């Protein structure tokens, strides 16, 4: 996600929660309760009617109590609530109030319907990546996958948090490289469900390197592994698992528990050399 300044969107407001004065503000944190639903078409509430009524009660109370900041959990707000708020001004937040309603998933047609709304009193902003792009990163992947492979992995584009620098990471892994701590990003890995269950899934004893341990278990076994020459995802290079100093301990523990001490010593040397090179760059 790329954050933008409100001023860059030609939106002028002075939110009560950001004023530097002694005014007291009210906050409303809504804890939604319902049955979660997910399939190939949407992610959200199983009971749409119940969720709609709950949200309607929430926004009416927020409006009645003049709430300065309303927050709701992800994938909980039905689109029907957004439609009703657009149609009814009385359900919209008052001036200088902000309501963060985290919605259920929307398909591109539903997003396009919102874009096409003609309402002078309404401003809708989307990131281009979600609306105008017709690229589907998984189309190429689906053509490469069949029932024979247990694990498929591809290339990733590593980006920084400002999204202004990037490079392609294109590693080919082997059993030997895995034992020395080489990895692929979990965002670019597809594992057959049966294989995932056979190897015992993720070992939650590892707080950072559970995905690396999972790779080790699959590469160590007699499983079919395939690398595809496609960029599957953008990867945040500023994350914890990308930080050698922060991820070193957990990764070293996996190598220690799975392999002999010789591999651990070599891994330590590799990390030291990487940090040394980075310090001089």
Image (cartoon, rainbow, N blue to C red):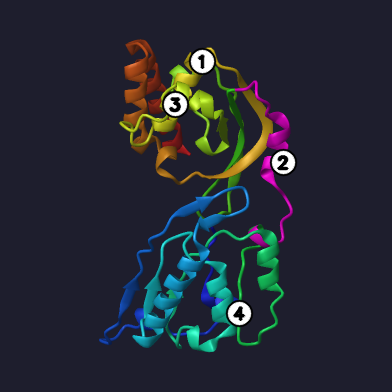
| Residue 176 visible, this angle | no
Viewer-nearest residue: 5 or 69: 69
Where is residue 118 drawn, in percent x and y? 70, 82
Label 2 neighbourhood size at 10 Å, few (<14), some (14-19), many (20+)? few
Residue at the spot x=70%, y=63% of the render?
109
Q: CA distance from mark 2 to mark 1?
A: 29 Å
Viewer-nearest residue: 129 or 169: 129
Q: CA distance from mark 3 to mark 1?
A: 13 Å
Q: CA distance from mark 3 to mark 4?
A: 45 Å
Quadrant showing the N terminus: bottom right
Label 1 neighbourhood size at 10 Å, few (<14), some (14-19), many (20+)? some
Q: Which residue is mark 2?
A: 139
Q: Which residue is mark 1?
A: 175
Where is residue 158 drawn, in percent x and y? 56, 42
Which of marks 1 and 4 precedes in the sequence? Answer: 4
Viewer-nearest residue: 56 or 188: 56
Where is residue 247 drawn, in percent x and y? 37, 35
Q: Which residue is mark 4?
A: 123
Q: Which residue is mark 3?
A: 214
Q: Is residue 136 found inside the magenta-colored segment of the image?
A: yes
């Amino acid at each position: 996600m790329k954050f933008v300044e409100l001023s860059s969107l030609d939106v002028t407001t002075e939110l009560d929660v950001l004023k530097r004065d002694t005014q007291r503000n009210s906050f409303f944190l809504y804890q939604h309760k319902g049955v979660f639903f997910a399939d190939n078409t949407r992610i959200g509430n199983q009971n749409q009617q119940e969720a709609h009524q709950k949200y309607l009660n929430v926004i009416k109370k927020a409006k009645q109590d003049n709430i300065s900041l309303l927050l709701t959990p992800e994938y909980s707000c039905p689109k029907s609530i957004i439609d009703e708020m657009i149609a009814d001004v009385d359900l919209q937040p008052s001036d200088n109030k902000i309501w963060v309603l985290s919605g259920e998933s929307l398909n591109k047609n539903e997003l396009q319907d919102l874009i096409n709304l003609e309402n002078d009193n309404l401003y809708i902003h989307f990131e281009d990546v979600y609306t105008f792009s017709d690229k589907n990163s998984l189309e190429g992947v689906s053509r490469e996958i069949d029932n024979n492979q247990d694990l498929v992995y591809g290339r990733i584009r590593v980006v920084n948090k400002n999204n202004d620098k990037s490079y392609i990471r294109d590693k080919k892994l082997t059993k030997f490289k895995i034992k020395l701590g080489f990895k692929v990003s979990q965002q670019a890995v597809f594992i057959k469900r049966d294989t995932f269950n056979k190897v015992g899934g993720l070992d939650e004893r590892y707080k950072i390197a559970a995905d690396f341990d999972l790779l080790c278990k699959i590469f160590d076994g007699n499983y079919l592994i395939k690398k595809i020459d496609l960029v599957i995802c953008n990867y945040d290079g500023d994350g914890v698992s990308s930080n050698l100093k922060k991820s070193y301990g957990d990764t070293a523990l996996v190598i220690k528990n799975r392999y002999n001490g010789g591999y651990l010593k070599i891994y330590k040397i590799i990390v030291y050399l990487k940090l040394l090179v980075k310090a001089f760059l």
